[in-house]
Image (cartoon, helix red, strand yellow):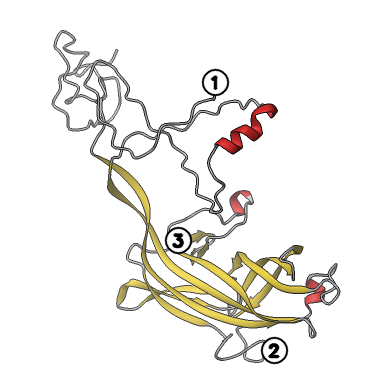
Amino acid sequence: MACCGNNQVRGRVFQRPITGECPVCKPEEAINPAEDACVCPPLGEPKLLTIVAPVVFDECGINLCRVVDNLDKIFDDLDFERDNVAGIELRVIDIDFNFGKENGSKVETLVRRPNCVRVTLSQIDVTFAAKVIDQNCRVIAEECFTIQYLPGDEEDPYFDNDTNPVSIAIDVYAPYGVSYKLDCECEPVISFLGFVEDGDHGNNALRQGIITQALAKVVNLDVDSLSAAIGLTIYIKSVYFVQYKIPHKGLCVPPKCIPVDIEPENACLDFVEGDLLEQSIQPLELCCKPKTIKHGFCEVEDPTPAEECPKKRS
């Protein structure tokens, strides 16, 4: 057994700054839990807890817009006139910034401005998940498709200096730097926070550095010409994980699932004697009011606002 004076570990050994005695060297002496948490962890509830949270250090947004032709080729199983198409709902699920390509996007360090970077967006390929809605608000078709914004060339048929220019450059406050792609050389990149789940190639996880999010909307739909003008909002952020202290509001205990016994003979009576139906849908409250754990120390007043969990009907 290792001891303070007989340590078999090679190299230097570091400990947290505690004032308690070593329980191996002096086992007869009492250990103060407040002085040696490695032996007796502290009991009770702290007033503050430390968390690591993603913090937005800088953020700005831009709007782009371009026309998409030949909607019948995107929704090839749909007849826009026969099916009474009334609108298209869009969600941006991915953006390929085409880093490393000619006239593609890039992130550059600014001379004499070390706390900022210049983000240039160009030739970005945006992937949408689309839902086609009819006049009765029913979803009649779903499809994913990709189109390009910021064409990088003024000869492009969808180029417009006001709504879809060649490129856009934005200076972003990024004091802790950016993320890199480790290939032959460190290439600064932008992360897109989207909805693609594909292992290491997905984009639905938050990362440090320069990240983007996007929203889209069909601002004009022409069923006769089978074309649509799609507006795109891109949010550019610098995000870093930072430690913070938060007020402790008590333990959070997940509710236990209970079986449901269906009693058909009492269903109508329960409904008549029960509460009125409500139209608004409320978010879930996932935690129950915690019970105080008794281990020989004083009970701690529970400051959590959660209600008691419902019990199975007897």
Disc nearest the viewer among 3 and 1: 1
**Image position of 193 (left or right of 3):** right
Image quadrant where residue 215 sits: bottom right
> In the rendered structure, which disc, 2 or 3, sits on the residue that comes first in sequence?
2
Query: Is residue 216 positioned above or below 198 on the image?
Result: below
- Kind of residue at badge 1: Ser
Tell me how far mark 1 sits from mark 2, CA to CA: 71 Å
- Give x and y (percent) for residue 122: 56, 78
Callout 1: 10 Å neighbours few (<14), some, many (20+)? few
Q: Which sits in the foreground, 68 or 228? A: 228
Q: Which sits in the foreground, 102 or 77? A: 77
Residue that badge 1 annotates = 314
Callout 2: 10 Å neighbours few (<14), some, many (20+)? few
Residue that badge 2 annotates = 157
Tell me how far mark 3 sits from mark 1, CA to CA: 57 Å
Q: What count of labels does the image hold?
A: 3
- Give x and y (percent) for residue 19: 13, 26
Query: Is residue 269 positioned above or below 84 on the image?
Result: above
- Is residue 100 visible to the viewer in this orientation of the structure? no
